Image (tube, rainbow, N blue to C red):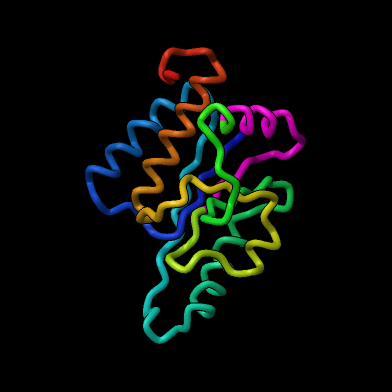
Amino acid sequence: MKITFLTVGKTEDAYLKEGVDKYVKRLKHYTRLELADLPELKNTKALTEQQQKAKEAELILKKISPTDYVVLLDEKGTELSSKQFAAYLEKRSLSTAASLVFVVGGPYGFDRSVYDRANDRLSLSQMTFSHQMIRLFFTEQLYRAFTILKGEPYHHE
């Protein structure tokens, strides 16, 4: 199964890019992972919050195919432990979806149209993190989940 990590904006801080790259390289042993960064909107000061979410939604929905299983990383989503996330990935890998797409929205979250298209919502924490940090946290958790599934000694209880 292919996994796509779709985000609005880019990671600019070198230390975060380095961390993301580290886990992306490690993940090549377990799965096909594509990082897809959508460009940040320009001239957003002239847009309302809703207009900004709608424009981001257009970009997000263009990147998603009808057969994708779409999971929004959203503060209102279900929180899972690392072991539960590993089991979630295993279950999704057995489904008929061609691709699993995890999506991080812009600073105001998602437009209703994206929520309507999504198959699921997960939350990484009740805390709020920058979008750049989420990229690192998520790629690390993805790597951790695969090591759990393979019984490798990365995760400790």
Q: Is residue 35 above or below residue 156?
A: below
Name the one closer to the observer, 156 or 12: 156
Point out residue 29 in the picture as x, y percentages from the top left corner: 48, 21
Question: Horizontal placement of 34 versus 154: left or right?
Answer: right
Point out residue 136 in the picture as x, y percentages from the top left corner: 37, 42
Question: Horizontal placement of 98 versus 52: left or right?
Answer: right
Q: Is residue 65 above or below residue 113?
A: above
Point out residue 98 in the picture as x, y percentages from the top left corner: 70, 39
Name the one closer to the observer, 66 or 134: 134
Q: Residue at x 41, y 52 (%)?
A: 127
Q: Residue at x 50, y 41 (%)?
A: 34
Q: Which residues are magenta?
A: 86-103
Q: Quadrant of the N terminus?
A: top right
Point out residue 48 in the picture as x, y percentages from the top left corner: 47, 83
Q: Residue at x 72, y 28 (%)?
A: 94
Name the one closer to the observer, 90 or 58: 90
In the rendered image, residue 66 lying in the magenta stretch gets the answer no
In the rendered image, residue 93 lying in the magenta stretch gets the answer yes
Q: Is residue 72 above or below residue 98?
A: below
Name the one closer to the observer, 21 or 156: 156
Single out the residue that lies furthest toward the bottom.
46
Question: Horizontal placement of 127 versus 118: left or right?
Answer: left
Single out the residue that lies furthest toward the right.
96
